[in-house]
Amino acid sequence: MCDVAKVQKIAHCLGVAPGKVQLNEEQVVTRTSGQNKSVAGFSTILESLANESKSETAQNSKVSREVEAQVYQWIEFSVLYVAPGSRDRNVAKQLLGDLNKLFASKSYLVGHFITLADLAVYYAIYDLVKSLSPVEKEAYLNLSRWFDHLQNRPDVHQGEPLLNFTTIYLHGWATGTHI
């Protein structure tokens, strides 16, 4: 999860120059910005990117201390659980099921707008969702709706091919009917 490409994608989403992003000798992702200011660790890097950004996503991530804390928890969750869990098929199935249940009553992970939490989890599960068959995607309708919504934002998919979520069942039922 904490690789260079994901940090660069999130920086692009936030409209911020990523600076020099690399893995240090301990394989921890680090970022050096234009002022030769260096930060290490995925969460810390995302926080620094959000502080530099004027984007809607960054602002949504900082509307209150409560929101900031929840966003931070989701980012840590994506690093500590989602990324490693995506490699084990049984853990991945449980993870997708849990996220699917969560999105039965929510459109975003924190609040009512996209935040850094959504970006971190989206990029953490991207390869896992990409590997799902259309029938498997149908088992996760709510998660599929959230994922498809995010991937259709140009700043998120960044020219990557859009994943296909158009089956008869998905198309008819995953219309985002949330309260």
Image (cartoon, helix red, strand yellow):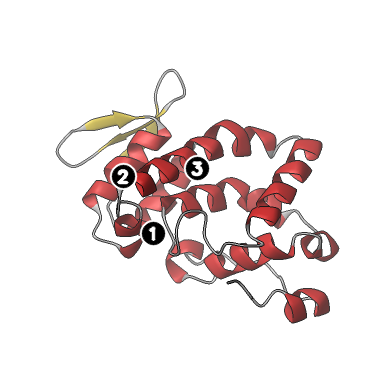
Q: Residue at x 78, y 45 (%)?
A: 93
Q: CA distance from mark 2 to mark 1?
A: 22 Å
Q: Do the residues bearing badges 2 and 1 touch, measured as CB atoms within 8 Å?
A: no
From the viewer's perspective, tell me whether residue 103 is left or right of residue 136.
left
Q: Earlier in the sequence, mark 3 or mark 1?
A: 1
| Secondary structure category for the residue under label 2 | helix
Circle 1 packing at 10 Å, graded few (<14), some (14-19), many (20+), is many
Residue 17 position in % (x across, y down): 27, 52
Q: Nearer the viewer, mark 3 or mark 1?
A: 3
The residue labelled by disc 1 is 13
The tag on residue 32 is none
Q: CA distance from mark 2 to mark 3?
A: 14 Å
Q: Quadrant of the N terminus?
A: top right
The residue labelled by disc 2 is 65
Q: Residue at x 27, y 41 (%)?
A: 48
Q: Which image quadrant for residue 147?
A: bottom right
Q: CA distance from mark 3 to mark 1?
A: 17 Å
